[in-house]
Amino acid sequence: MQELIEARFSIGNVVKHRYLNFRGVIFDLDPSFNNTEEWYLAIPEKIRPIKEQPFYHLFAQNEEIFYIAYVSEQNLLIDKTGKECNHPDIKQVFSHFDGTKYIPYSRATN
């Protein structure tokens, strides 16, 4: 029987990294670590997260680039700026920004 995991963040939330200078929109999540061991060991040990927690896929951005990030729950915070993100892939998954979060197409109302 699979253990029920409660995630702190949801699809569409705008978040920022606790230590690194980027923010993004959550578009998917894994209930626990689901990446390569090589990727995991590349994280500096001082900020390396535990594997037994939700991990989030983000449309991420910083001042210079857009990219996809994979981040542990312990290293994320809600971004309270109210600013939209500019990642070009957001429009493929989300219909609009409601001022606090992005609304997926399947949940959009007219």
Image (spheres, rainbow, N blue to C red):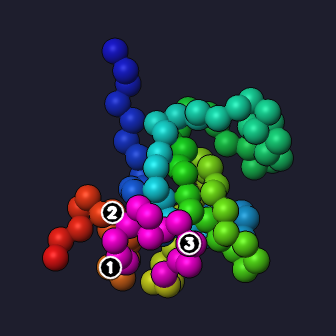
The span shown in magenta is 84-97
Q: Quadrant of the N terminus?
A: top left
Q: Position of residue 63 (x, y in %)?
A: 73, 80
How many numbered circles does the render carry? 3
> Which mark lies nearer to you, 1 or 3?
3
Observer-nearest of 19 and 40: 40
Q: Position of residue 48 (x, y in %)?
A: 74, 43
If you read the primary sequence from the N terminus, does the residue marked by circle 2 or circle 1 appear first?
Answer: 1
Q: Secondary structure at mark 1?
A: loop
Q: Which residue is mark 1?
A: 98
Can residue 68 be seen here? The reply is: yes
Q: Position of residue 12 (x, y in %)?
A: 40, 63
Q: Could you give the CA–CA distance between mark 2 and mark 1, rounded to whole angstroms? A: 11 Å
| Residue 49 forms part of the magenta stretch | no
Q: Which residue is mark 3?
A: 88
If you read the primary sequence from the N terminus, does the residue marked by circle 1 or circle 3 appear first?
Answer: 3
Mark 3 Cα shell of 10 Å, populated few (<14), some (14-19), many (≥20): few
- Give the residue type that dot 1 points to: Asp
Q: In the image, which disc is placed on residue 104?
A: 2
Observer-nearest of 13 and 44: 13
**Which residue is pictured at 73% across the width and 72% down the height?**
65
- Give the residue type that dot 2 points to: Pro
Q: Residue furthest front?
A: 92
Q: Could you give the CA–CA distance between mark 1 and mark 3, rounded to whole angstroms? A: 18 Å
Q: State left or right for residue 28 relative to residue 100.
A: right
| Residue 91 forms part of the magenta stretch | yes
Can residue 16 be seen here? The reply is: no
- Which quadrant of the view contains residue 38? top right
Q: Could you give the CA–CA distance between mark 3 and mark 2, rounded to whole angstroms? A: 15 Å
Q: Position of residue 53 (x, y in %)?
A: 53, 38
**Which residue is pictured at 35% across the width and 30% down the height?**
4
